Image: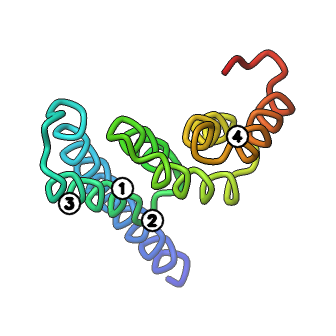
Amino acid sequence: MLARVLLAVCALIVIAWTGVLVRDHYLGKSAAAPLLYQPDLSDRDFRRNMDRLSDARFLDPDSAADLARTEYYLFRGRPRAAARVAEALVRSEPANADAWRLLWRATRVVDPTRAQEAAAELKRLNPLATL
């Protein structure tokens, strides 16, 4: 009897987590569409969609949403905001070469010293990487 109850509890947890991940996926997808395809977004709409993209990380261990947020900030001409997101990524995932590359892109003009550090770290992680 106890085994069945534990199995049922585990199944409910898996179903709930799957539901959250599906919600996160659709929230991120709906926030990314205007960011990608509407370059004339107002600052208010841009912030709202970026917040929605950030909310799409709820219980999702994947860093894809943060990588995308960094890219969108760069596209929008906000390298300091992009650098903040990329810095958080490299702190939490120091082996993420994509995060280091984005950190380099975000800081190469506003903080050349940090950009050199990011480039060196990227080369350490992937000696064949190009910037």
Q: First in sequence: mark 1 or mark 3?
A: 1
Do tag 1 and tag 2 residues touch (Cβ < 8 Å)? yes
Q: Is residue 28 left or right of residue 2?
A: left
Q: Mark 1 falls on what kind of element? A: helix
The secondary structure type at the circle numbered 3 is helix
Report which residue position mark 1 lands on.
21
Looking at the picture, how far across and down is residue 119, in whole percent?
A: 75, 33
Coloration of the structure image? rainbow
Residue depth check, mark 2 versus mark 3: number of the one nearer the observer: 3
Q: What kind of residue is marked 4? A: Ala
The residue located at (48%, 75%) in the rendering is 4
The residue at which mark 4 appears reads as: 115
Q: Amino acid at mark 2?
A: Leu
Which quadrant of the structure image shows residue 51? bottom left
Q: Give me the C-alpha separation between circle 2 and circle 3.
A: 20 Å
From mark 1 to mark 3, how far is it between C-alphas? Answer: 20 Å
Residue 120: which disc? none
Mark closest to the chain's N terminus, 4 or 3: 3
Numbered circle sitting on residue 48 = 3
Q: Are marks 1 and 4 in contact (CB under 8 Å)?
A: no
Q: Position of residue 131 (x, y in %)?
A: 66, 21
Q: Which residue is mark 2?
A: 59
For marks 1 and 4, the one nearer the N-term is 1
Secondary structure beneath dot 2 equals: loop
The label nearer to you, 4 versus 2, is: 4
Task: Classify 10 Å Cα crowding around label 2: few (below 14), some (14-19), many (20 and above).
Answer: few
Q: Please, what is the three-letter code of the amino acid marked with disc 3?
A: Arg
* Residue appearing at x 31%, y 54% in the figure: 53
